[in-house]
Amino acid sequence: MSYFGCWGLPMALLTLLCCPGSAEAFEVYIEFEKQVVEATESLKINCSTSCAEPELGDLETHLVKTMLDQHPKGRWKLFLVSNVSQDTVFLCHFTCAQKQQSRELRIRVYQPPTEVTLTLWPQRVLLGEAFTIECKTSAVKPLESLTLTLLHGKKILQIQTFEDSEPTLQEVTVTFNSTVSTKDSLNFSCQAELDLRPYGENITHCISKSQLLDVYVLMPDNQMVIIIVVVSVLLLLFVMSVLLCFIFGQHWHRRRTGTYGVLAAWRRLPRAFRTRPA
Ligand SMILES: *[C@@H]1O[C@H](CO)[C@@H](O)[C@H](O)[C@H]1NC(C)=O
Ligand SMILES: *[C@@H]1O[C@H](CO)[C@@H](O)[C@H](O)[C@H]1NC(C)=O
Ligand SMILES: *[C@@H]1O[C@H](CO)[C@@H](O)[C@H](O)[C@H]1NC(C)=O
Ligand SMILES: *[C@@H]1O[C@H](CO)[C@@H](O)[C@H](O)[C@H]1NC(C)=O
Ligand SMILES: *[C@@H]1O[C@H](CO)[C@@H](O)[C@H](O)[C@H]1NC(C)=O
């Protein structure tokens, strides 16, 4: 370590910050209440060291901090950080015998969904036609803990999970397209669930008001078409049967009268023959 002496304190600080493992003389510890903080909440952080008499100790942050308490010899300092509204890295550092040690703390911010809205386009749809469901949440974080579930009654239509890409709170929108295949009106809702159990917090649910998709069918028109077709067919059958009756009737009548004519002539004939030999 004497090698660094000629470079002075700044270089030593820099080296120690870069490579904390290279100086084992004392340790720096961070204690904190929770791994995740709800957006705009405050957080208590206790920076402490194994150094018996540290020359300096502090918490580095761009957020507003207040020192609540400290050890008489500065072996620990308790800070309150207010309004944590984004994922933040905190740095506790102590200087002991002109050497500096630091430790980092990453705190993630969460924001449970407070409102979920479901919108239907259109709200009234013809049987067989397409419609769109849009589910939108209020600002949420972290997205990777969020699950959006689209429900039809109690049936799950779609489950959507996300990857956390943004460090800031954001609203989330999911759309679902489908076509109507039933005559009944459809009851949709959307549920947002933020599962913070991996961070020692609870699951938060928020469900939208249910929305009814009004389904209609072109019933009167269809019935008219069916009635017209049936009546036409019946009319055609009636006309054809009347026509056939008439044709066959005429034919039969002609055959009968023709037969009687021949029969009468034939009957008359034997009488003539019968009288001739007599
Ligand atoms: C801060 O941490 C140190 C080391 O763990 C502990 O001795 C001290 O009591 C803590 N201070 C408070 C106020 O919790
Ligand atoms: C908290 O922080 C946010 C963003 O950093 C800021 O917009 C807001 O005004 C702050 N609120 C308070 C009470 O300081
Ligand atoms: C729609 O479904 C929800 C949840 O299943 C239920 O509470 C609500 O009464 C239903 N609404 C109608 C109009 O059926
Ligand atoms: C749903 O349909 C709309 C318009 O018809 C389209 O803009 C949107 O990308 C579709 N969404 C999905 C998830 O297919
Ligand atoms: C989780 O919720 C239960 C019941 O609502 C509550 O008793 C418990 O304290 C909560 N846990 C946390 C870590 O918030």
Image (spheres, rainbow, N blue to C red):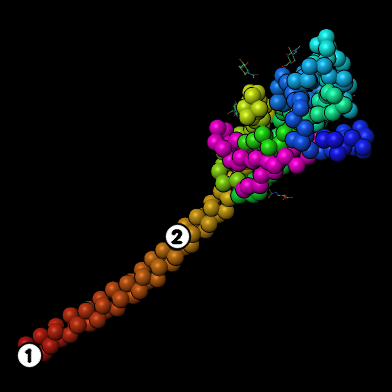
Residue labelled with disc 2: 238
Tell me which segment is drawn in magenta: 150-179
Q: What amino acid is at disc 1?
A: Pro
**Which is nearer the N-term, disc 1 or disc 2?**
2
Q: Is the residue marked 2 within 8 Å of ligand 3, measured from its CB? A: no
In the picture, measured across the screen, residue 50 lies left or right of residue 12, that is: left
Q: Residue at x 71, y 36 (%)?
A: 143
Dot 1: what SS? loop
**At x 86% / y 39%, what residue is drawn?**
3
Q: Residues within 10 Å of mark 1 (few under 14, many from 20)?
A: few
Q: Nearer the viewer, residue 267 or 192?
A: 192
171 or 203: which is nearer to us? 203
Q: Which residue is mark 1?
A: 277
> Which numbered mark, 1 or 2, is in the foreground of this view?
2
Can residue 46 be spotted in the picture?
A: yes
Quarter of the image for residue 258 reads bottom left
Dot 2: what SS?
Answer: helix
Residue 53 is inside the magenta segment: no
Can residue 37 be seen at all in this image of the molecule? no
Name the residue: 91% across, 32% down. Answer: 9
